[in-house]
Image (cartoon, helix red, strand yellow):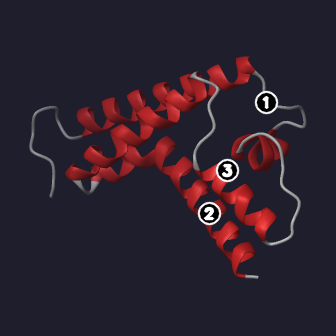
Amino acid sequence: MIERIAADLIVLLHLAFILFVGLGALFCLRWKWMAWLHLPAAAWGAAIEFSHGICPLTPLEQRLRLAAGDAGYAGGFIDHYLLPIIYPAGLDATFQYALGGLVVLLNLALYAWIWRWRGGSRPLRK
């Protein structure tokens, strides 16, 4: 039972991290220092997609599910949880490149918008 709860918490953490990778730049509107956390997270997210890698949270979740007596699954978090919602087909290299590019472009656009919204060199709020 505890392994199943832990696996579910890992899924929630993983989803929160993915949302932070995609939209974490928006936190910089309120907290300037958040860029120090977000930029490495966004770089990691893009690198995982471009390299066709698997986030370390995925194997951890799978081990916890197996320890709980559940069946594991093949592939990664995005392939197992998110793609079935968006696309019924499996994750392929082209789509992973597209996801990596989306992470980069979305974050470049958000940071450019924040920079412009803040007036360029004006100090950000703490």
Say which residue label 3 marks: 59
Circle nearer the viewer, 2 or 3 = 3
Amino acid at the residue labelled 1: Leu
* SS state under label 2: helix
114 or 85: which is nearer to us? 85
Badge number at residue 91: 1
- Number of marks: 3
Give the structural element (helix, strand or loop) at label 3.
helix
Seen as rendered, the residue at the extreme front is: 67
Tell whether 60 sits left or right of 45: right
User: Tag 3: residue type?
Assistant: Pro
Which quadrant is home to the N terminus? Answer: bottom right
Q: Earlier in the sequence, mark 2 or mark 1?
A: 2
Residue in view at x 59 percent, y 43 percent = 55
Which amino acid, mark 2? Ile
Q: CA distance from mark 2 to mark 3?
A: 10 Å
Distance of label 1 from label 3 (alpha carbons): 17 Å
The residue that disc 2 covers is 10
Q: Quadrant of the C terminus?
A: bottom left
Residue drawn at x 17%, y 35% is 119
Q: Is residue 55 above or below residue 94?
A: below
